[in-house]
């Protein structure tokens, strides 16, 4: 990538960082993407699954096709960085690098538009609402794969702590199935000085919180991976009253369906039995997503593309218990999801941290890998039949 394009992409990335938008509200971000695609001369269709955009480049006589995807939404976090391009939106920031992913995909479009050395069709998928708001599902429900056919699909995510510009390629699972739960214990309210007249959901919830922590240690095979964590506890309005109900919310993470079903069954059973012990009832609500799992031929293509782009490749990183809704694309198409090193973590700037910032120095590597993997996919053997 020449220095002029790198400087242009850096300016675009910093503009997006300064103007973050939450999932399902990416109107200005989508408009910015459309404006830059128009400047690059790349045709596009907007309004897919909300604020999603799909751009298309076709060259030569090949009927082969490939998709490249980037996410566009930000997080409800107040930025703590003191930067010239600091978020200008209160309590919203790009704390996960989606500003960089979007910019890198625009950069890949720029590189492929000027590259005569490929034949086929490349789809550039700019996805809204990745951060738990169902953006991938919305685009799929809107017929993105039927309207814009692609044989394979690829994406990347920046990774703080990994050497800048290094591509990490996993065999199989990359990120876990993200799940959420809410458990409400319904007791009987009363005066805190007369506890015998009540059924105290706070005491019961204390036992439940501890019991839930035994699920992973005592109900999941030690050779498998799972996480059960509680993030919120809500209950009570006055110091001298025992409330009617208390609820908690949390997350669970697994990599395979059998473990997920075991964890879900135990969450429900533990909640019901703790509630019964204290003569009350439990309400359990759960949701879960999909694990992000690479298909073997596409994982090999991802690594080969990194080498073709002159980038270092790591194959030894463990999968993460974070989640990613790109999994819903991988449930329909062969593909691969890679991590690109963001460089050393500075000032606590991990993902979803209020001091995180995308490293603009890796934009050439990110765009270069995306362009290279598209070319690798278009020149490779046809993929297996999609699901």
Image (cartoon, rainbow, N blue to C red):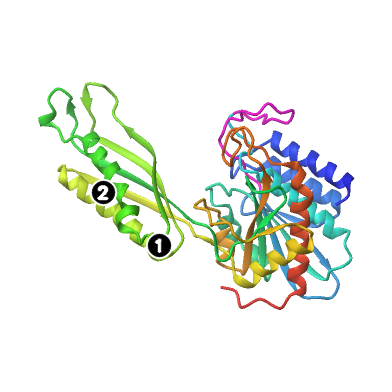
Q: Nearer the viewer, mark 2 or mark 1?
A: 1
**379 is higher (above) or lower (below) than 187:** below
Identify the element where label 1 is drawn: loop
Is the residue marked by circle 1 packed among few (<14), some (14-19), or many (20+) residues within 10 Å? few
**301 is higher (above) or lower (below) than 318:** below
**Label 2, label 1: how many angstroms apart (C-alpha)?**
25 Å
Residue 67 seen by the camera: yes
**124 is higher (above) or lower (below) than 343:** below
User: Magenta includes 75?
Assistant: yes
Mark sitting on residue 223: 1
User: Magenta includes 298?
Assistant: no
Asked if residue 261 lies left or right of residue 74, the reply is left
Residue displayed at 64% across by 30% down: 89
Q: Position of residue 41 (x, y in %)?
A: 86, 54
Part of the protein shown in magenta? 72-90
According to the picture, the residue beneath numbered tag 2 turns out to be 271
> Which circle's residue, 2 or 1, is located before the other in the chain?
1
Q: 344 or 190, which is in the foreground?
A: 344
Q: Position of residue 171 (x, y in %)?
A: 58, 66
Q: 249 or 313, which is in the foreground?
A: 313
Asked if residue 221 lies left or right of residue 9, the reply is left
Which quadrant of the view contains residue 136?
bottom right
């Amino acid at each position: 990538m020449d220095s002029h394009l790198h400087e242009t992409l850096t300016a675009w990335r910093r503009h997006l960082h300064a103007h973050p938008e939450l999932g399902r509200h990416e109107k200005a971000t989508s408009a910015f993407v459309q404006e830059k695609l128009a400047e690059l001369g790349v045709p596009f269709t907007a309004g897919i699954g909300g604020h999603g955009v799909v751009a298309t480049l076709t060259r030569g006589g090949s009927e082969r096709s490939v998709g490249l995807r980037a996410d566009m939404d930000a997080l409800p976090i107040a930025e703590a960085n003191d930067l010239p391009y600091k978020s200008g939106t209160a309590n919203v920031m790009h704390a996960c690098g989606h500003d960089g992913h979007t910019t890198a995909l625009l950069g890949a479009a720029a590189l492929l538009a000027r590259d005569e050395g490929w034949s086929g069709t490349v789809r550039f998928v700019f996805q809204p609402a990745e951060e738990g708001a169902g953006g991938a599902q919305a685009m799929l429900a809107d017929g993105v794969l039927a309207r814009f056919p692609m044989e394979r699909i690829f994406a990347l995510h920046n990774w703080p702590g990994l050497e800048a510009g290094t591509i990490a390629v996993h065999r199989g699972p990359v990120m876990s199935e993200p799940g959420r739960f809410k458990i409400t214990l319904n007791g009987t309210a009363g005066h805190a000085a007369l506890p015998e007249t009540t059924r105290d959901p706070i005491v019961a919830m204390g036992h439940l919180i501890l019991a839930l922590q035994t699920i992973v240690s005592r109900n999941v095979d030690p050779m498998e991976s799972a996480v059960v964590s509680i993030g919120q506890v809500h209950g009570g309005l006055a110091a001298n009253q025992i409330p009617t109900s208390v609820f908690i919310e949390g997350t669970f993470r697994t990599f395979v369906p059998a473990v997920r079903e075991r964890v879900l069954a135990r969450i429900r059973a533990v909640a019901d039995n703790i509630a019964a012990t204290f003569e009350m009832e439990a309400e359990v609500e759960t949701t879960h997503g999909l694990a992000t799992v690479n298909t073997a031929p596409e994982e090999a293509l991802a690594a080969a593309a990194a080498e073709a782009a002159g980038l270092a490749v790591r194959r030894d990183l463990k999968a993460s218990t974070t989640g990613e809704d790109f999994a819903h694309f991988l449930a329909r198409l062969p593909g691969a999801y890679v991590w690109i090193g963001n460089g050393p973590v500075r000032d606590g700037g991990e993902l979803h941290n209020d001091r995180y910032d995308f490293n603009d120095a890796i934009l050439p590597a990110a765009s270069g890998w995306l362009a290279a993997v598209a070319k690798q996919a278009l020149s490779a053997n046809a993929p297996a039949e999609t699901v």
